[in-house]
Amino acid sequence: MIRKAFVMQLDVGRQDEYRRRHDKIWPELSALLHSHGVDNYSIFLHPKTGQLFAYAEIESEDRWQAIAQSPICQKWWRFMADMMSVGPDGSPTSIDLPEMFHLD
């Protein structure tokens, strides 16, 4: 298991809508994540900056990266693009965070 953390940027004033959309996450997206070895996935909001901190446990980086190629993931990105920073391919702009400490 690999612990993965990254940050994304939410647009100002969009926290309620972001939460609403994630509260109703599509079952096919949830199934896709699980089928690609993603577990224990959480996203947290820094209320003053709009920065989103995401944490997931994944089986492999290759399987994690493969999610981006799926039509359902790309559809989700389009669905979310109106409220967050995205790249040219429509994916959320994100910065991977290296693990600096872990305590079991």
Image: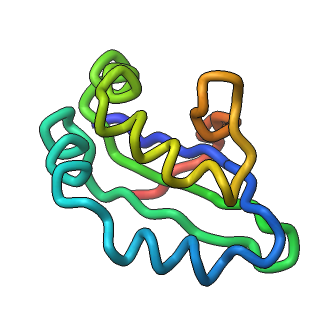
The location of residue 24, given as percent across then percent down, is 32, 74
Vertical relation: 57 (above or below) 82? above
The answer to whether residue 57 is left or right of residue 35 is right
User: Foreground: 57 or 68?
Assistant: 68
Quarter of the image with the N terminus in it = top left
- State the residue at coordinates (22%, 54%): 30
Vertical relation: 65 (above or below) 59? above
- State the residue at coordinates (74%, 46%): 85
Vertical relation: 31 (above or below) 26? above
User: Foreground: 8 or 14?
Assistant: 14
Q: Residue furthest bottom?
A: 16
The mark total stands at 0
The image quarter containing residue 63 is top left
The image quarter containing residue 94 is top right
The answer to whether residue 86 is left or right of residue 70 is right
The answer to whether residue 27 is left or right of residue 78 is left
The location of residue 74, given as percent across then percent down, is 42, 34
The location of residue 41, given as percent across then percent down, is 37, 57
Vertical relation: 89 (above or below) 72? above
Quarter of the image with the C terminus in it = bottom left
- State the residue at coordinates (26%, 60%): 26
- State the residue at coordinates (20%, 33%): 36
The location of residue 79, given as percent across then percent down, is 49, 52
User: Foreground: 5 or 83?
Assistant: 83
- The chosen color scheme is rainbow
User: Foreground: 85 or 94?
Assistant: 85
